[in-house]
Image (cartoon, rainbow, N blue to C red):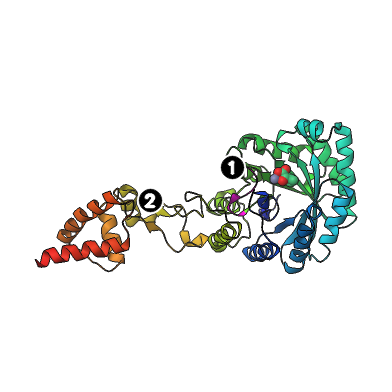
Amino acid sequence: MQNDKVQIFDTTLRDGEQVPGCKLDKKEKLAIAERLDVLGVDVIEAGFPVSSPGDFTSVQEISKLVKNATVCGLTRAVENDIKVASEALTYAVRPRIHTGIGTSESHMKYKFNATPEQIMERAVKATAYAKSFVEDVEFYAEDAGRTDNEFLARVLEKVIQAGATVLNIPDTTGYCLPEEYGAKMRYLRENVKGIENVILSCHCHNDLGLATANSISGVINGARQIECTINGIGERAGNTSLEEVVMILKQHPTLNLHTDINTQLLYDTSCMVSEKMGMVVQPNKAIVGANAFAHSSGIHQDGMIKNRDTYEIMNPQDVGVNETSIVLTARSGRAALAYRSKKVGYELTKVQLDAAYEQFLNVADRQKEVKDDDIHMIMERIQMRAGA
Ligand code: KIV
Ligand code: ZN
């Protein structure tokens, strides 16, 4: 019987930071790591220590700072990478080394010019070497999404024997379909000896917009860790978005899966990462985008004013957004105008509302959105007319 907790492995500071032009300095990385720890992530991938002295120091400082989450450092299947990562993680309360190698035809042939047997040997050697430094070793089979399942299963069986505690199955190129990625997880659960003693992890990229769907399919089929980033940032089209997978699991209790994330901190954390990385969040981004809880069409607004259940499947406060917004545009109806007017202090009779609505449409046709100041101006005009 599998546990129903899905671990959240945040890689904002490693895979996320690979976004062109979004380099963070050490102070910014520490602030984000501290926030992630408070948010309740299980693992913080703090960086790739061998890649630069700056990354080494950041991983080291994050290791000293973080008290709850596991702190993880990435390596290639190269001895020096692993040794350097273990040094950077010395002060971590819960250190993890994340090592691995490409296992797809394309990676074996073009990146490594190596045979499958040589790749397997390097995978096992790297895992065993990492295990000589830390208890918690995660192995990634890069491009697992396009790797032959039988070969992948053989590699994973060997790295479990060498001491891996977590097996990462990256869809590195974002190519898989949800059904295919889920079937891969199921195949591994059914065909890898020793799999019941380790955690299978989803690591999906968003090249076809399927990273979230693939990660959810992965956990439905037995994975118990999702690797993701705040706002879904990452190289190319990005990684799985943390806020999306967390809220999907929360809003679908019938899946019987949960995370330990404090969801009320999601919006603030999204703003913090966006600001520090200088990367705007698209307004229509699920969960944390500016329009995620904004209703602008008259039909929707009328429904929402009657009962929010008509058009909202989650409570904005659950993700740290203060309230739903009813945006007044030329598509808004009388109900929305009356609702918004009441909020800013005007209780209108039917006659007043009709007069105000006529004025409102004139303003709305001239500008994209009618703001509170415009409502005050409209009300002044209709009061003046009534008095004239
Ligand atoms: O996408 C990927 O394959 C990765 C690995 C290095 C884990 O980020
Ligand atoms: Zn990745």
Which residue occupies 65% across, 66% down?
31
Is 271 situated left or right of 55 in this image?
Answer: left
For label 1, the crowd category at 10 Å Cα-Cα, with few meaning under 14, some 14 to 19 and many 20 or more, is: many
Q: Amino acid at mark 2?
A: Thr
Determine whether the beta carbon of the residue marked 1 sits less than 8 angstroms from the nearest atom of ligand 2: no
Q: Is residue 135 visible?
A: no
**Element type at mark 2:** helix
Question: Which residue range is magenta in the image?
Answer: 230-236
Q: Quadrant of residue 379?
A: bottom left
Q: Position of residue 205 (x, y in %)?
A: 64, 42
Inspect the magenta stretch and tell me whether residue 144 lies in it: no
Residue, disc 2? 310
What is the distance, in whole Å, between disc 1 and disc 2 at their CAs? Answer: 24 Å
**Any mark on residue 213, and which?**
1
Of residues 143 and 214, which is closer to you in this image? Answer: 143
SS assignment at label 1: helix
